[in-house]
Image (cartoon, grey):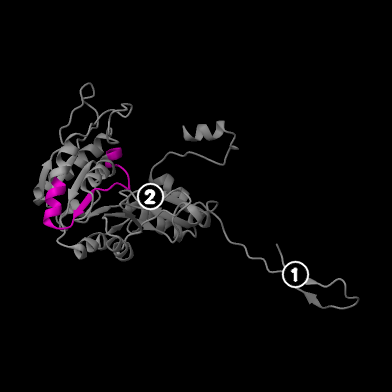
């Protein structure tokens, strides 16, 4: 549909092409000598594959991978605002976006208990519906297979010892009983050794990982294999600046749950969230899709009769 709209708007044929295919098609693109650059968004394993094969073929490649974004909640944060932000950031688009916020890190036990008490009724009030329902907070996940994968992760969390506070499995929408719906799910007491914490669930599942202090809160996203986005919720300017400077993550939000800047700024993560040396959007995107040409010129001085002296005028 997007390609059709571009054509309707007058884009010359051949500028934008839509090609469907699997690994064979991807490999053909990565190996084709007429293709100079490749930009990819997907899972980290495939992103690494695309990056490695494309670079080996002499191409410029940016490959964006997975994410496990954290939201750090300091004791002084406005918890009502935090809960409102988490409802959208963790469950919007059914959690199927790389900038979702599936991990919340309250600092201190008191903060954790106060946050949990506010989260439960807010999550239980979320409305799951068809994508055309204007009152729905989010719709179905992409496929039956992915629904099963998310529900398997939920069971894995239970098996690993996390506390399942709200279970979204088995959700049925009246009139759409065969739809790929997963209800909002909340885990508490998730720990860093759990597979469900280490891996990207990519669904409407929010995990609470409790931190005893600020240092532990900074360390959690910094040590994680993914480094796409992170947020801190606080009223303390010093804590926010310290966190932003020290955390080992590519995009940082301060009281912004999904730290995606407007398009003229750069967008991209660190570690296994991105492969390549340039980000998307803004001047980084311009750099990726263009090549620098440097011209140095020297011209003879035509005013000097029989003189072969040269001057170097300003060009441009």
- Is residue 263 rendered to the left or right of residue 144? right
Query: Mark 2 sits on what residue?
Result: 260
Position of the C terminus, as image quadrant, is bottom right
In the image shown, does 26 or 241 lie closer to the viewer? 241
- Is residue 34 rendered to the left or right of residue 150? right
Residue placed furthest toward the top = 175
In the image shown, does 239 or 226 lie closer to the viewer? 239
Q: What stretch is highlighted in magenta?
A: 92-116
Query: Mark 1 sits on what residue?
Result: 313
Which residue appears at 29% of the width and 39% of the height?
A: 92
In the image shown, does 75 or 131 lie closer to the viewer? 75
Give me the disc on residue 122.
Answer: none
- 99 in magenta: yes
In the image shown, does 24 or 205 lie closer to the viewer? 205
Q: Characterize the local packing of mark 1: few (<14), some (14-19) or many (20 or more) Cα atoms within 10 angstroms.
A: few
Q: Is mark 2 on a helix, strand or loop?
A: loop
The percent position of residue 244, horizontal first and vertical second, equals 32, 61
Q: What element carries label 1?
A: loop
Determine the image quadrant of residue 164.
top left
Determine the image quadrant of residue 272.
bottom left
Q: Distance between the residues labelled 2 and 1?
A: 44 Å
Which mark is first along the chain, 1 or 2? 2
Residue placed furthest toward the right = 305
Q: Characterize the local packing of mark 2: few (<14), some (14-19) or many (20 or more) Cα atoms within 10 angstroms.
A: some
The percent position of residue 278, horizontal first and vertical second, equals 45, 59
């Amino acid at each position: 549909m997007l390609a059709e709209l571009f054509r309707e708007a007058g884009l010359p044929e051949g500028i934008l092409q839509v090609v469907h295919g699997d690994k064979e098609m991807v490999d053909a693109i990565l190996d084709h000598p007429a293709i100079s650059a490749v930009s990819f968004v997907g899972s980290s394993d495939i992103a690494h594959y695309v990056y490695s094969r494309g670079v080996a073929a002499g191409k410029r490649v940016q490959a964006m991978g997975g994410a496990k974004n954290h939201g750090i909640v300091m004791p002084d944060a406005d918890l009502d605002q935090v809960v409102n932000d988490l409802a959208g950031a963790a469950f919007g688009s059914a959690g199927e976006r790389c900038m979702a916020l599936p991990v919340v890190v309250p600092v201190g036990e008191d903060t954790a208990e106060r946050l949990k008490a506010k989260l439960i009724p807010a999550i239980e009030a979320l409305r799951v519906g068809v994508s055309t329902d204007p009152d729905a907070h989010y719709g179905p996940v992409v496929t039956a297979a992915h629904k099963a994968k998310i529900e398997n992760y939920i069971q894995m969390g239970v098996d690993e010892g996390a506390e399942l506070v709200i279970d979204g499995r088995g959700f049925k929408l009246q009139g759409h009983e065969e739809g790929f719906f997963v209800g909002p799910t909340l885990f508490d007491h998730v720990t860093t050794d759990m597979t469900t914490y280490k891996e990207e669930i990519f669904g409407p599942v929010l995990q609470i990982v409790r931190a005893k202090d600020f240092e532990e809160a900074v360390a959690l996203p910094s040590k994680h294999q993914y480094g796409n986005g992170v947020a801190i919720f606080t009223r303390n300017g010093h804590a926010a600046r310290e966190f932003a400077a020290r955390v080992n993550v590519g995009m940082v939000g301060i009281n912004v749950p999904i730290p995606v800047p407007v398009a003229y700024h750069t967008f991209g993560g660190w570690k296994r969230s991105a492969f390549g040396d340039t980000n998307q959007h803004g001047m980084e995107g311009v750099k990726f899709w263009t090549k620098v040409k440097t011209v140095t010129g020297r011209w003879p001085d035509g005013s000097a009769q029989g003189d072969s002296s040269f001057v170097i005028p300003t060009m441009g």
